[in-house]
Each structure stands twice: as structure tokens, then as C-alpha cells.
Amino acid sequence: MALRGTNQEFGRPYNRRIVLESIRRHGPIARSDIARHVGLTVQTVSTIVRELEEQGYILSV
């Protein structure tokens, strides 16, 4: 049986969790470093970080 990719609807919550976990583990961290740690593109990480900032979960410094 072949593995299937995760569609955007189900992948987004997972991606948000791994970005938050990376920030939690590494403290202040550049978006490019988050992308490298979690295997996402910088653009995807930037989108997630912006959403998390708008929702008050994180602050950029």
C-alpha cells in the first residue's frame, strides 16, 4: 500500500504544531532555521508564524 500525502486541510494543524514545537525547543529562532528543523519551506513557515502572531500565540522580536 502506497503512502499518501496529507492534504492542506489536515496538514495545516500538524504544521502549526511542529512550528510551535520548534520555537518552544529552540527559543528565539529565525524562520529559515525553523524551516530547516521541521522540513518546511521558509514561505510556509512565514505564513504559519504570521498566523500565530495574529492569534497572539507568539511574538516576533
Image (spheres, helix red, strand yellow):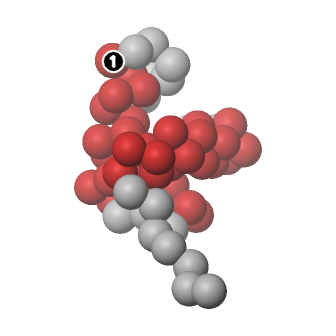
Q: Which residue is mark 1?
A: 54
**Identity, as a three-letter code, of the amino acid under mark 1:** Glu
One can see residue 34 in this view: yes
Look at the picture and state if 48 lies above or below 34: above
Please name the residue shown 45% across and 22% down the image: 59
Which quadrant of the view contains residue 54?
A: top left
Residue 60 lies, in percent from the top left, at 41, 28
Please name the residue shown 35% across and 64% down the image: 41
Horizontal relation, residue 54 to residue 4: left or right: left
Tag count:
1
The quadrant of the image that shows the N terminus is bottom right
Look at the picture and state if 11 lies above or below 41: above
One can see residue 23 in this view: no
Residue 34 lies, in percent from the top left, at 51, 55
The quadrant of the image that shows the C terminus is top left
User: In this view of the protein, which residue sits in the foreground, 24 or 12?
Assistant: 12
Please name the residue shown 72% across and 44% down the image: 25
Horizontal relation, residue 12 to residue 42: left or right: right
User: In this view of the protein, which residue sits in the foreground, 16 or 23?
Assistant: 16
Look at the picture and state if 11 lies above or below 28: below
